[in-house]
Image (cartoon, helix red, strand yellow):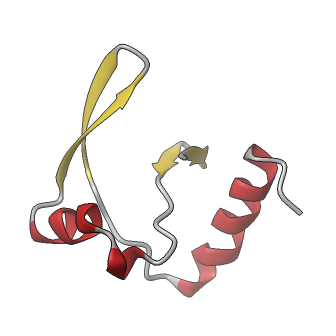
Amino acid sequence: MCFVHDGKLYVPAQSGSTKSWTHYAVADPRVRVKIGDRIYPGIATRVTDEALREPIRQAARVRYNLP
């Protein structure tokens, strides 16, 4: 699950503290994301700005047709 909001790719991590990949991303934020047959390099950044959380949630709702 991923989506774009304001030109940035977001990969949600519900219950992120229980997932291995989130710990790896914090330890070394250099990431590679495979979409289709292409691999894109990037830098993972945890969203901590409260002002961004709701717009990002709304973008996910729209992308995945969630209530």
Coordinates of residue 33 in the picture (x, y in percent): 31, 36
Coordinates of residue 46 in the picture (x, y in percent): 36, 71
- Between 60 and 13, the residue placed more toward the observer is 13
Q: Residue at x 49, y 82 (%)?
A: 49
User: Is 17 displayed left or right of 47 in the figure?
Assistant: left
User: Is 16 displayed left or right of 67 in the figure?
Assistant: left
User: On screen, 48 above or below 58?
Assistant: below
Residue reaching furthest to the top: 37
User: On screen, 53 above or below 55?
Assistant: below
- Between 35 and 59, the residue placed more toward the observer is 35
Looking at the rendered image, the quarter that the C terminus falls into is bottom right
User: Is 34 displayed left or right of 23 in the figure?
Assistant: right
Q: Residue at x 70, y 75 (%)?
A: 54
- Picture mark count: 0
User: On screen, 63 above or below 34?
Assistant: below
Residue 57, picture quadrant = bottom right
Residue reaching furthest to the left: 28
Residue reaching furthest to the bottom: 50
Coordinates of residue 62 in the picture (x, y in percent): 80, 50
Residue 44, picture quadrant = bottom left
Coordinates of residue 43 in the picture (x, y in percent): 24, 52
